[in-house]
Image (spheres, rainbow, N blue to C red):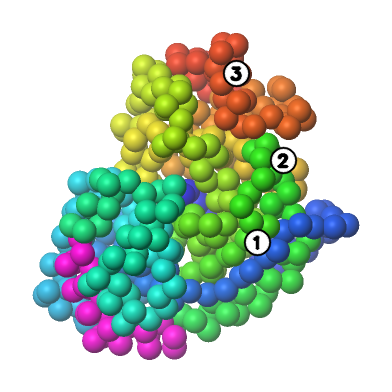
Amino acid sequence: MRTINVLKILILAGVFAFITQTAKTDTTMTNWKIEPSFKYDLFCFLNILTGDPFYLDYYQADYDSYKSRLTPDAVNALSSLKKKLKEDNGTIISAWLCLYFSVVDDNSIEELIETTRDPSRLKENFSKTIYHNNESWELFVSVKNELITILEFLKSSGYQEYWRENVLPKINATIDKLRPGLSNYDVIRENEYFLGYKLPSDTITVYMLYFCKPHGIKITGTRFLTSIDWPFEILLRNAAHEMMHPPYKYKEDAELRGLIESFSADEFVMDKVNNHNPSFGYNKLDGLFEEDCVQSLDQMINEKLNVSKDARRRWKESDDGIHVLAIALYQIMKEEGYNKNNEVFRDFLFRIYNTGKFRPGMIKDYYEKFYK
């Protein structure tokens, strides 16, 4: 998952014309699917319905047009949902719910209500994913009643019709513009090259949403959510980024967890973890570490595909400048010509850690070197 600054993006038409001329390959292995999703847009809409100022910066008019429909019960349920997920656990509401419900094929409010009332099928499916843990599932159960109240409200207030009439036409128009150029970009091939292993599928499914800003969101499988307001180059950046989450098996790898935890002794890194706007996410060391690994990798891919943002500008402007681990990893990758030896990324981390190139206490030096 990542936050994107869309204030300085390039004009769609110009970007599309440029990149389709610079990155076409003779043969591609990536199978692209791009489509709307009512379900995921609904869960992203909850960020806005809570009245959270972080999201109203992007969707004030949409909130104003819908808030008169809010009932007292819905307001209380939204407030409780926000407190339990975001305020108490540092979780992004939309990303968390989209991830959970990505393991079921519900597409209507009625189906979502039924699944929430009896989440046994959801639990069974989600338990088979790498994202499952008991603590997270208990959190889901704790917000079950709030979700039912909110979904019942959205049903009675005509949200599905509102979305179909006001949102879906905008999404379909964007898809029609973006779909033709995707086949020119073999993102799966680049992902596998830089990760050093095969991905589970050669298909990337892109769900185009209206309400997901400012987040790009990875869900289960080789699928992700992105905004219709971002141009073609950002769609490609999102694809390169999200397909690599997670870049290693965190839960199953005690040695790797130890490596990551060692950076809790790095004051520069922990200052970024502890002192940034929590709405961006990455509120724990392991979350920031994973994100920064993927950001360093995707920057290399984006540069190869000629769709990158300048690396120094990117990490200075993004998410309060917290991605200092990515800056260190990126410099090491550039120095080594990564990944010419087809090294598994997890092995790369241990090699540079054990040889002393990437250690706690060194990240500030890499940062200062990068911006000197």
Q: Earlier in the sequence, mark 3 or mark 1?
A: 1
Q: Quadrant of the C terminus?
A: top right
153 magenta-colored: yes
Instruction: Measure how far apart labels 2 and 3 are at the Cα level.
Output: 19 Å
Question: Is 8 placed left or right of 90 in the picture?
Answer: right
| Residue 77 higher or lower than 28, as above or below | below
How far across and how far down the image is residue 324, in percent? 49, 29
Residue 55, visible in the rendered structure: no
Q: Amino acid at mark 3?
A: Ile
Dot 1: element? strand
The residue sitting at 20% across, 46% down in the picture is: 88
Magenta segment range?
A: 143-165
364 magenta-colored: no
Crowd class of label 1 (few under 14; some 14 to 19; many from 20; radius 10 Å): some
| Residue 152 higher or lower than 290, as above or below | below
- Examine the image and state in which quarter residue 360 appears: top left
Report which residue position mark 1 lands on: 203
Crowd class of label 2 (few under 14; some 14 to 19; many from 20; radius 10 Å): many
Q: Earlier in the sequence, mark 2 or mark 3?
A: 2
- Residue farthest to the top, as pictured: 356
Q: Amino acid at mark 1?
A: Thr
Q: Earlier in the sequence, mark 1 or mark 2?
A: 2
Report which residue position mark 3 lands on: 352
Report which residue position mark 2 lands on: 193
How far across and how far down the image is residue 174, in percent? 60, 74
- Examine the image and state in which quarter residue 213 appears: bottom left
